Image: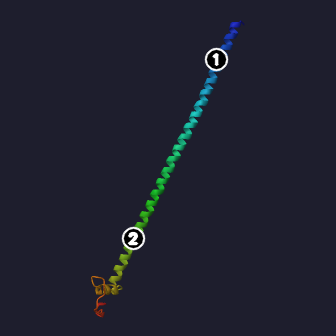
Amino acid sequence: MSTGAIVAIVVGALIVIAVVIMLIARSRREQRELKARRREAASSRREQAELRGRDAEEAEQRARIAQAEAERSRAEAQLHHERATAYEQGLADDELIGKEDEQPDGSASDQPAESSRRA
């Protein structure tokens, strides 16, 4: 083989090796970039998850407050219902008599309570 052919083969081999090295370097760089993007995306998703978690906790707290207020309203309604039943059954006549004896300014009347008012 001639010297020119050997040089051409060596130059061709060097070119092929250089191309392979460039492709490997490019691939590694792309992998590093992809890894960095993955970390960035994961971090962003975690932040969003934390925000949504806090929002959910706040919504749950508001729901618990609303539930407690609803329960309180139900209890007050039940109390009024029980008092109405007591008035209907004559179990709270002493309260009614006491209210009639009071003056508009909140002081008690000097008149004795009539026993005929109780039924």
Mark 1: amino acid: Ile
Q: Which residue is mark 2?
A: 74
Residue drawn at (64%, 24%) of the image? 21
Residue drawn at (68%, 14%) of the image? 10
Give the alpha-carbon distance from disc 2 to disc 1, as whole Å: 86 Å
Q: Is residue 46 positioned above or below 108 on the image?
A: above
Q: Which of label 2 and label 1 is nearer to you?
A: 1
Q: Residue furthest right?
A: 1
Q: Residues within 10 Å of mark 1 (few under 14, many from 20)?
A: few
Residue 113 lies in what quarter of the image? bottom left
Q: Position of residue 25 (x, y in %)?
A: 62, 27
Mark 2: amino acid: Arg
The secondary element bearing badge 2 is classed as helix
**Nearest to the observer: residue 62 or residue 101:** 101
The secondary element bearing badge 1 is classed as helix
Q: Residues within 10 Å of mark 2 (few under 14, many from 20)?
A: few
Q: Is residue 80 positioned above or below 116 on the image?
A: above
Q: Residue furthest top?
A: 2
Residue 106 lies in what quarter of the image? bottom left
Quadrant location, the N terminus:
top right
Q: Which mark is residue 56?
A: none
Identify the mark nearer the N-term, 2 or 1. 1
Q: Position of residue 53 (x, y in %)?
A: 50, 53
Q: Which residue is mark 1?
A: 15
Q: Position of residue 81 (x, y in %)?
A: 36, 76
